[in-house]
Amino acid sequence: MVNDPLEKFQHIWIQAQQSGLNRYRNSVCISTIDQHGFPNARFVDLKAVSDVGCIFCSDLSSTKAIEIQNHPKVSLTAWWEHVAYQIRIQGICQRISDQQADDFWQQRPRDAQLTSLTFDQSQGITSVDLLESRFLHAKKQDDQQYLPRPDTWGGFELIPTKIEFLAFKDTRLHIRHQYIWNEHHQIWEVQLLQP
Ligand SMILES: Cc1cc2nc3c(=O)[nH]c(=O)nc-3n(C[C@H](O)[C@H](O)[C@H](O)COP(=O)(O)O)c2cc1C
């Protein structure tokens, strides 16, 4: 068994990206804590898995970004049916560097960049028509030149303190390995859980 659960996560994620038919098959659910103490969950694209954490990107004025700023304890949940794994991570989120954010920004499709530049994610808007006309306007104005990352867009890295892998079995005899980071001994402790 791999001792480093992030390495194991990365391995499963690569498999999940390489196989399967869903277009957005590497998306993961990120849960934050809202102003009333409720969990608030939504899917995002997992951009990278580093040696220390899982990186995703977002508008920095969005609801999720504000909630992360207020409560950096965040969880990530993935269900990749085509590789038959559910993965649950709890940890602490921190902002990635501007340089890293620039790199991820440049990898985004043009339309995604234009959307981020045109809209204030999570704010209200009066109609779908207005939404579409604002985007159309942005497309018409687009001169196809290099688009620098706006200050309002960046990323977060979730540094795990707990990771659980559930290898899904049709029999329901799922194999669950839970890793908990022991801060004192600086090691991951692993336990097999009942299905
Ligand atoms: C498959 C999928 C991938 C998504 N990827 C992202 C993403 O990478 N970043 C992001 O900010 N929103 C992404 N979204 C939109 C979010 O789910 C969410 O609607 C948005 O970020 C606003 O969330 P908030 O109001 O809680 O901040 C994605 C949605 C789906 C369904």
Image: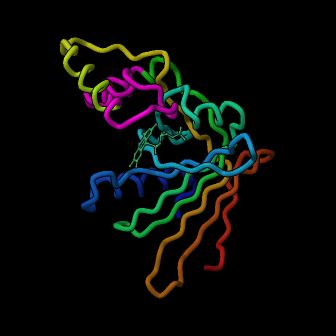
- Position of the C terminus, as image quadrant, is bottom right
**Residue 103 magenta-drawn?**
yes
Q: Quadrant of ligand 1?
A: top left
26 and 174: which one is in front? 26
Q: Residue at x 37, y 22 (%)?
A: 118
Q: Name which residue lies at 73% across and 45% down.
A: 186
Q: How is the image coloured?
A: rainbow
User: 29 left or right of 146?
Assistant: right
Looking at this view, is 30 or 158 the one in front? 30
Task: Give the x, y percent position of residue 90.
Answer: 65, 51
Q: Quadrant of residue 191?
A: bottom right
Q: Which residues are magenta?
A: 102-130
> Going by the image, does 53 lie left or right of 162?
left
Question: Where does residue 174 sit, x and y in percent of width and height?
Answer: 53, 78
Q: Position of residue 160 (x, y in %)?
A: 63, 46
Q: Identify which residue is drawn at 25% across, 20% down.
A: 137
Q: Residue furthest right?
A: 184
Q: With respect to residue 132, does 75 lie above or below?
A: below
Q: Quadrant of residue 62?
A: top right
150 over 47 or under it: above or below: above
Q: Residue at x 56, y 52 (%)?
A: 4
Q: Residue furthest bottom?
A: 171
Specify the principal SS of the magenta part. helix
Q: Observer-nearest residue: 15 or 69? A: 69
Residue 169: percent from left, percent from top: 46, 80
Q: Would you say 161 lies left or right of 48 here?
A: right
Q: Give yes or no for residue 127 being in the magenta stretch.
A: yes
